[in-house]
């Protein structure tokens, strides 16, 4: 981990109302406008944690006025976010993806977080090009076993109107109205720092990405706290920036191993084994498809998720080591 002494002196003195945390990975093409929007609409410190980018992300972030932690290795999203929050003394933390741009002030999110019984808040994520709400992504309900089975086997993609998918992606939810929500995207989420401490931070076992924000929101709700949505607070979002930087081998591994970790942590043994069985089937189908296209090549993307799924199904638990 990079020594933090070089940037701590650059952080503003005193306890700010809120601070912005942005985790980057090869984000040079988007981080500049993101920081510029924060400087315009968010009067608080901006701290970027870079996970060993190979491009000019660090230089661009510093040039645009952010404080930067430059990690020598990719510590994963949860660990990088925790690393940033540890260094901040703000009442609230605004977690942003580097491919977002604030379009309004976020003061109303701070106001929501100060309300009794509220631990986090979010606003409306809209498409960067069209301004249309990102329905089905910006806010979802917590996945249950049926949700993850349908996601794993592709049923939600083939039959998007099925009741499991409609419930999960909040097809009955009106994004124009303020409301309590379950799972806002970690791309645009404000939470109280004392709640982050109470929950013992983000779970770094979801490495390097996926499901860490879902798990954080689930634990927050299980603690009896509410997450509020304010539609007048808006941010534009390109979507898929960090995941798009991953090769397909890693995307498949990271997604299914993190999915299994979430199921193991939050589901009963029977439901966890059901999800493990679905991931096993998905791995077999993926292996068959890859063999058809590449008969004489290895399929390394299958190995780890398959091993995790088999152990989850047979032993009811996952290997302790991650990816």
Image (tube, rainbow, N blue to C red):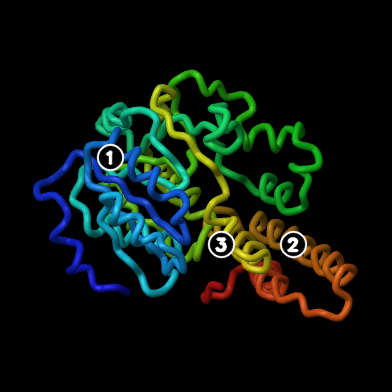
Q: Quadrant of the C terminus?
A: bottom right
Rate crowding at label 2 as few (under 14), some (14 to 19) or many (20 or more) other CA atoms within 10 Å.
many
Pair 1/3: label in front: 1
Q: Which residue is mark 2?
A: 277
Contact? badges 1 and 3 (CB < 8 Å): no
Q: Nearer the viewer, residue 147 or 47?
A: 47
Seen from this angle, which residue lies furthest left? Answer: 14
Q: Which residue is mark 1?
A: 39
Distance between the alpha carbons at the discs numbered 1 and 2:
47 Å
Total numbered badges shown on the rendered structure: 3
Q: Quadrant of the N terminus?
A: bottom left
Say whether residue 151 is left or right of residue 38. right
For the point 32% across and 31% down, the residue is 106
Q: Is residue 79 above or below residue 178?
A: below
Residue 10 in picture, x, y percent from top left: 16, 57
Badge 2 marks a residue whose secondary structure is: helix
Q: Which residue is mark 3?
A: 261
Residue 211 in picture, x, y percent from top left: 53, 54
Badge 1 marks a residue whose secondary structure is: helix
Q: Tell me where residue 2 sits by quadrant.
A: bottom left
For the point 29% across and 60% down, the residue is 68
Residue 20 in picture, x, y percent from top left: 30, 46
Say whether residue 176 is left or right of residue 304. left
Q: Nearer the viewer, residue 124 or 59?
A: 59
Say whether residue 213 is left or right of residue 151. left
């Amino acid at each position: 981990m990079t020594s933090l002494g070089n940037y701590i002196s650059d952080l503003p003195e005193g306890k700010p109302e809120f601070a912005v945390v942005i985790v980057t990975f090869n984000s040079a093409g988007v981080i500049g406008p993101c920081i510029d929007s924060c400087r315009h609409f968010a009067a608080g410190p901006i701290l970027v944690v870079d996970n060993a980018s190979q491009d000019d992300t660090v230089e661009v972030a510093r040039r645009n006025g952010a404080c930067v932690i430059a990690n020598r290795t990719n510590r994963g999203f949860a660990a990088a976010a925790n690393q940033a929050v540890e260094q901040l003394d703000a009442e609230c933390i605004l977690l942003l993806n580097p491919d977002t741009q604030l379009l309004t002030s976020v003061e109303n999110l701070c106001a929501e977080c100060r309300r009794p019984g509220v631990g986090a808040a979010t606003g409306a994520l809209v498409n960067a090009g069209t301004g249309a709400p990102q329905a089905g992504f910006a806010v979802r309900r917590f996945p249950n076993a049926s949700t993850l089975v349908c996601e794993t086997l592709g049923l939600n993609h083939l039959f998007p109107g099925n009741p499991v998918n409609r419930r999960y992606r909040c097809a009955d939810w009106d994004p124009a109205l303020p409301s309590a929500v379950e799972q806002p995207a970690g791309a645009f989420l404000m939470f109280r720092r004392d709640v982050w401490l109470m929950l013992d931070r983000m779970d770094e076992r979801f490495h390097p990405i996926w499901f860490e924000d879902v798990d954080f929101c689930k634990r927050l709700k299980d603690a009896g706290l509410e997450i509020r949505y304010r539609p007048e607070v808006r941010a534009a979002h390109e979507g898929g920036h960090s995941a798009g930087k991953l090769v397909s081998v890693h995307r498949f591994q990271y997604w299914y191993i993190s999915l299994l970790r979430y199921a193991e942590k939050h589901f009963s043994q029977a439901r966890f084994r059901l999800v493990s069985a679905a991931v096993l089937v998905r791995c077999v189908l993926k292996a068959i498809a890859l063999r058809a296209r590449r008969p004489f090549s290895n399929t390394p993307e299958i190995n780890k998720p398959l091993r995790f799924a088999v152990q989850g199904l047979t032993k009811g638990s996952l290997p302790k080591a991650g990816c």
